[in-house]
Image: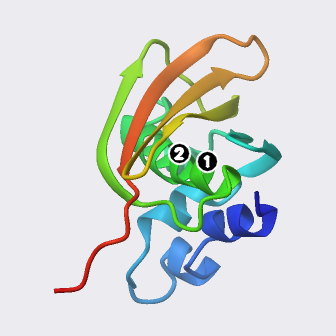
Amino acid sequence: MDPEAVRRSLEPTASAEEITGSTPARLHFYDPFVLQGVSIESSEHGRLLCSFVVAPRHASPAGYLRSGVTATLADQLGSAVFYCSGLPRSGVSVEISVSFVDVATVGEEIEVEGKLLRAGKSVGVVSVDFRKKKTGKLMAQARHTKYLAVSSRL
């Protein structure tokens, strides 16, 4: 496991100015917009634990965490689990599914736990659980499948 690779995979690729909109829009806007404020609590082989506080930028007008933000976090944090497992790359997403069982509101702290379920020669699968940190109540659960094999050059 390379903790530095995990950290680098979650590092925002846009500046604060790009995120806040004070400069022209650039590529790679959405992921840093969502990932800003996510803290790595712990990482070990095949497991990553993070947390974040639902910010107004993450929420709908009604104040609930947007499903797209949850899906983006499932994608990014699920991918980081492969680095926690010692793999040199996180692969290419094949499928991401998210089941929503509760809502989170602005100001709530959410704990996100990603676990490696399988890493074969060509396919890997992780689960990503979103829980309310205060109560431990499950908010959403994602399954992320990735193609891991190195592409051949034609």
Q: Decide: is 81 above or below 62.
A: below
Specify the amino acid type for callout 2: Gly
Percent position (x, y) of residue 102?
49, 13
Residue 38 falls left or right of residue 15: right
Percent position (x, y) of residue 62?
43, 29
Q: Residues within 10 Å of mark 1 (few under 14, many from 20)?
A: many
Residue under label 2, please give it. Answer: 78
- Residues 107 and 67: in front is 67
- Residues 154 and 17: in front is 154
Q: Residue at x 63, y 39 (%)?
A: 54
* Count of numbered circles in the view: 2
Percent position (x, y) of residue 129?
57, 26
Determine the secondary structure under disc 2. Answer: helix
Q: Which residue extends farthest right?
A: 42
Residue under label 1, please give it. Answer: 81
- Residues 153 and 16: in front is 153
Q: Residue at x 72, y 13 (%)?
A: 136
Determine the secondary structure under disc 1. Answer: helix
Q: Residue at x 48, y 77 (%)?
A: 21
Specify the amino acid type for callout 1: Val
Q: Which residue extends farthest front?
A: 121
Real-space Cα separation, disc 2 to disc 1, in angstroms: 5 Å
The answer to which quarter of the image holds residue 55 is: top right
